[in-house]
Image: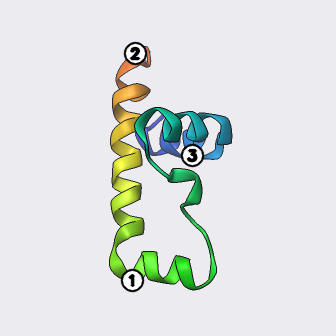
Amino acid sequence: MTFGEVVLVCAANRELVANIDRLKGTRFLEMGRGGIAGMIDEATGHQHDQCAEFCAIVYDLVWVRLPRVSA
């Protein structure tokens, strides 16, 4: 499994994202909101910053702890 796949699985798990928000004080559950707020987030780069922060958290909390299987 690649890191990108792990990020997608984590992002699809609403309970995990809600707990990350609670523990880290982030607002990832609000990412991807539509309408004017979503356009503003995208235009200001806020959405990109949030995605980068989410990836960093997933890397620290999930990716580095996954056991590696040699092929």
To which residue does mark 2 refer?
A: 70
* Residue at screen point 56% across, 33% down: 19
- Closest to the observer: 47 or 70? 47
Q: Amino acid at mark 2?
A: Ser
* Image vertical order of residue 60 relative to residue 11, above or below: above
* Residue at screen point 40% across, 26% down: 61
| Circle nearer the N terminus (2, 3) | 3
Q: Residues within 10 Å of mark 3 (few under 14, many from 20)?
A: some
To which residue does mark 3 refer?
A: 11
Q: Amino acid at mark 3?
A: Ala
| Circle nearer the N terminus (1, 2) | 1
To which residue does mark 1 refer?
A: 43
Q: Could you tell me if the residues under marks 1 and 3 are in contact, i.e. CB atoms within 8 Å?
A: no
* Residue at screen point 46% across, 32% down: 23
* Residue at screen point 50% across, 83% down: 39
* Image vertical order of residue 52 relative to residue 17, above or below: below
Q: Amino acid at mark 1?
A: Ala
Q: Quadrant of the C terminus?
A: top left
| Circle nearer the N terminus (1, 3) | 3
Which mark is nearer the camera, 1 or 2? Answer: 1
Which mark is nearer the camera, 1 or 3? Answer: 1
> Disc 1 to disc 2, how far (Cα)?
42 Å
Q: Position of residue 43 (x, y in %)?
A: 39, 83
Is 53 left, or right, of 19 in this rendering?
left
